[in-house]
Image: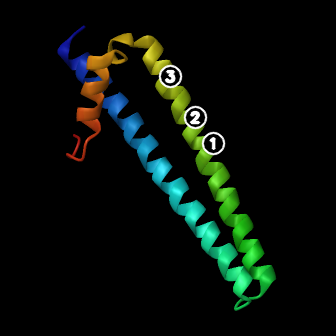
Amino acid sequence: MSAKTKQREEKELACMFKHQQRVARKVDSLEQAADRLIAEANTGRYPRLWVTMRVKQVRYQIKRVRWHQVKNSDRIKRFAEKHPQYMDEQGWDMLVGMISDKPFR
């Protein structure tokens, strides 16, 4: 395998994992937003119908984001089947290094 191909594969895998991290953060923030809205509905400060409609919208967003999470997991699994060298212990260490906080090119 050429160095360029290996570099491209590493970059592709790192992008998939970074995307997975972003999606997980998005789901967490949306779930927190839904919880806050439900708590707000219980105070009675806003019309209940408005709050329940907004909660439905947020739950739909969560559903869409989770769908993307599943699709990306499938992409990672397919990549792992094609490139088993990334799935041993050293490969995972390499992945963690690529996904860390340093900017990725």
Name the residue rendered at 25%, 42% in the picture.
100
Q: Which residue is mark 1?
A: 67
Q: Which mark is residue 57?
A: none
In the rendered image of this protein, does residue 9 appear above or below residue 105? above
Seen in the image, is 77 located left or right of residue 52? Answer: left
Disc with the residue nearer the chain's start (3 vs 1): 1
Mark 2 residue type: Lys
* Residue 93 x %, y %: 26, 26
Residue at 59% of width from left, 36% of height from top? 70
Front residue of 8 and 96 = 96
User: According to the image, label 2 marks what residue?
Assistant: 71
Q: Residue sitting at 34 percent across and 15 percent down?
A: 88
Looking at the picture, which amino acid does disc 3 mark?
Lys
Apparent side of residue 63 relative to residue 16 in the rendered image (left or right): right
Q: Quadrant of the N terminus?
A: top left
* 76 or 91, nearer to the observer: 91
Q: Residues within 10 Å of mark 3 (few under 14, many from 20)?
A: few
